[in-house]
Image (tube, rainbow, N blue to C red):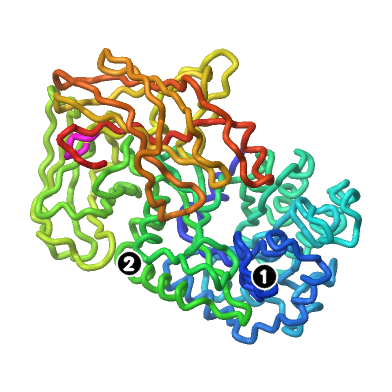
């Protein structure tokens, strides 16, 4: 059982810095003059480099520009409260002085300095939590590590590799973890990664080691088999609606974790801030990555973005630190909301102008303040009418006509108590109705594993699995266009022939989902999103309605990456939401 006090600092922090740095920063995505596809820190696997060749990079690794204090200051100025560093990534190279294996930065490189030690000391001086990443199952330098299976990669014959992970675990990983947990002071958390096929006993051993040696240290759930203290979402995956969990979103600034000179796809500061706010508004932490160059310096693109985030945090950080999900059942078209104590924070991506209305808030508002301009006078009006479908309405008057300068202005509402809201799926101001999968009621078929996962997406949603149902308020009569927003894993092509059936407003609609509109997912190219038209629905009067969605047929999808073949076992329609849009709208 998770100890609440153990997680308290982590919930207060909400924002952390991830650092992926190692030998892979030298090739930086290019091997022997060829640009290598895939993420930079895994160039060893993607380029199928023989380990004997990769080991030679250590003799070149002399990052004279590395400055632990400067990196930690960059994190602190950005409003980050913890730092997670890759003590050892999948390539097996330790960025600390390990007595267990000479393949480490002190013994094998001319740099000869213990980077983990320097970062731990810098974090202690700055007053933020120092944490470590450790790849416990994938170690491509050890013959029994997972996924080191390309021809010529290792002196050990291919057929003999990976036969007994316990040899790697007991001979290298556990002893190195003991070094990290005893020689570098207090560790805030251990970010284990990719348990792959770890047994329950192996996962338990990794987790138990941390809890025995540093009882206050957290363990993320990538240790495997349910032994973590909190949940980590997939890389660059975001929750779509709050699932009331302790979760963390690990995210990149471009598409690679380790420095990759050939990846210019930098998200701008506004996109990164949106991701931070989105994570916290759904009750999750946001762990944002930088990948230093081989000389130890941080790319200027990363520095500029962290500095811009820091400027926003100086004014609006109270809406992030210690905050969590607001009690409203649906996301908002105008922005996001976070809650902390008796305060509610409205974070605007679309400025409403001088007047703003909010439906469903039940708690009395005592005062409203614009965090960027605390002298601005904002008038508050609250009404309740038992005849309304959504019975509580809040109106704020006196907001600036134009949006304040900068990203995402925040209005703070000081309430008479902890914020409470009606749990009605209500229309937005434009009349559109969003039915997120995370808010659906599930009706399973016998033997079905249909469920909602921690991102708010269905798991095991296919033909014969059951149905998703929503009860919602339609305040405007008339014709609505029904759309489905879905996503897919990057290793899957779009599946043709997905047939669904929808029952709503005494109508039954059958449709084949087709990618009518492909959306640009700014957070991650690995989870493309698509809008499909389903049909039209008529509401003859305002009222409460129910929508039921069933998958009639879902063909199997092709998996392009053999390392993702296990995803086929959980075949599912990744439905994000069903959306009803008044026909007068021309959104698509």
Q: Determine whether, in the image, residue 228 is placed left or right of residue 249.
A: right
Marks 1 and 2, the one that precedes in the sequence = 1
Residue 337's tag is none
Residue 231: give x, y in percent of width and height.
56, 45
Q: Quadrant of the N terminus?
A: top right
Q: Determine whether, in the image, residue 36 is placed left or right of residue 390.
A: right
Q: Determine whether, in the image, residue 238 is placed left or right of residue 189.
A: left
Residue 502: give x, y in percent of width and height.
36, 20
**Which is in the foreground here, disc 1 or disc 2?**
1
Point 60% across, 45% down: residue: 229
- Element marked by disc 2: helix
Point 33% across, 69% down: residue: 314
Residue 487: give x, y in percent of width and height.
45, 41
Q: Quadrant of residue 382?
A: top left
Magenta stretch holds residue 468: no
Q: Is residue 435 among what the camera can see?
A: no
Dot 2, crowdedness within 10 Å: few (<14), some or many (≥20)?
some
- For mark 1, what is the residue? 24
Main secondary-structure element of the magenta-colored stretch: loop
Point 9% across, 54% down: residue: 354
Say above or below: 313 vs 3.
below
Magenta stretch holds residue 429: yes
- For mark 2, what is the residue? 312
Q: Quadrant of the C terminus?
A: top left
Say above or below: 11 vs 225.
below
Point 28% across, 53% down: residue: 347
Q: Which residues are the magenta region?
A: 428-432
Q: Quadrant of residue 504?
A: top left
């Amino acid at each position: 059982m998770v100890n609440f006090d153990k997680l308290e600092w982590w919930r207060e922090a909400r924002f952390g810095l991830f650092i992926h740095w190692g030998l892979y920063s030298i090739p930086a995505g290019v091997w022997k003059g060829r640009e290598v596809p895939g993420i930079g820190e895994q160039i060893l696997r993607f380029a199928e480099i023989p380990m004997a060749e990769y080991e030679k990079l250590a003799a070149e690794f002399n990052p004279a520009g590395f400055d632990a204090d400067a990196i930690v200051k960059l994190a602190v100025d950005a409003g980050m409260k913890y730092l997670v560093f890759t003590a050892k990534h999948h390539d097996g190279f330790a960025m600390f002085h390990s007595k267990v294996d000479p393949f480490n930065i002190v013994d094998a490189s001319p740099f000869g300095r213990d980077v983990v030690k320097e970062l731990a000391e810098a974090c202690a001086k700055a007053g933020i939590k120092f944490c470590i990443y450790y790849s416990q199952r994938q170690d491509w330098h050890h013959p029994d590590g997972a996924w080191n299976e390309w021809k010529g990669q290792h002196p050990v014959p291919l057929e003999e590799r990976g036969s007994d992970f316990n040899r790697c675990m007991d001979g290298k990983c556990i002893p190195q973890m003991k070094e990290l947990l005893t020689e570098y002071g207090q560790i805030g958390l251990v970010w284990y990664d990719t348990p792959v096929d770890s047994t329950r006993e192996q996962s338990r051993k990794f987790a138990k080691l941390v809890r025995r040696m540093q009882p206050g240290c957290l363990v993320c759930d990538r240790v495997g088999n349910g032994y973590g203290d909190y949940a980590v979402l997939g890389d660059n995956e975001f929750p779509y609606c709050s699932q009331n969990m302790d979760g963390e979103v690990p995210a990149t600034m471009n598409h690679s974790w380790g420095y990759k000179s050939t990846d210019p796809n930098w998200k701008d500061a506004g996109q990164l801030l949106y991701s931070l706010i989105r994570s916290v508004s759904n009750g999750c932490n946001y762990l944002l990555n930088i990948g230093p160059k081989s000389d130890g310096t941080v790319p200027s693109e990363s520095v500029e973005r962290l500095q811009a985030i820091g400027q926003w945090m100086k004014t609006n950080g109270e809406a992030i630190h210690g905050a969590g999900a607001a009690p409203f059942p649906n996301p908002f078209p105008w922005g996001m909301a976070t809650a902390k104590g008796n305060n509610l924070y409205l974070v605007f991506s679309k400025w409403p102008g001088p007047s703003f209305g909010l439906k469903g808030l039940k708690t009395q508002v005592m005062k409203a303040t614009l965090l960027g301009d605390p002298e601005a006078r904002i008038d508050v009006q609250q009404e309740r009418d038992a005849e309304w479908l959504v019975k509580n309405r809040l109106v704020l008057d006196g907001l600036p006509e134009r949006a304040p300068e900068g990203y995402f202005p925040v209005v703070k509402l000081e309430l008479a108590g902890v914020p409470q809201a009606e749990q009605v799926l209500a229309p937005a101001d434009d009349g559109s109705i969003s039915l997120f999968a995370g808010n659906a009621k599930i009706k399973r078929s016998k033997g079905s594993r249909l469920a909602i996962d921690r991102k708010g997406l269905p798991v095991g949603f296919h033909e014969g699995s059951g149905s998703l149902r929503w009860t919602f308020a339609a305040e405007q009569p008339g014709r609505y266009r029904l759309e489905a927003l879905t996503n897919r894993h990057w290793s899957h092509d779009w599946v043709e022939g997905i047939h669904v059936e929808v029952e709503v407003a005494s109508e039954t609609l059958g449709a084949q989902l087709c990618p009518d509109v492909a959306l640009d997912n700014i957070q991650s190219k690995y989870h493309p999103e698509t809008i499909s038209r389903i049909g039209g629905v008529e509401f003859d009067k305002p009222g409460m309605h129910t929508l039921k969605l069933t998958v009639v047929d879902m063909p199997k999808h092709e998996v392009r990456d053999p390392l993702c073949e296990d995803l086929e076992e959980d075949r599912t329609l990744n439905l994000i939401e069903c959306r009803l849009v008044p026909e007068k709208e021309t959104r698509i």
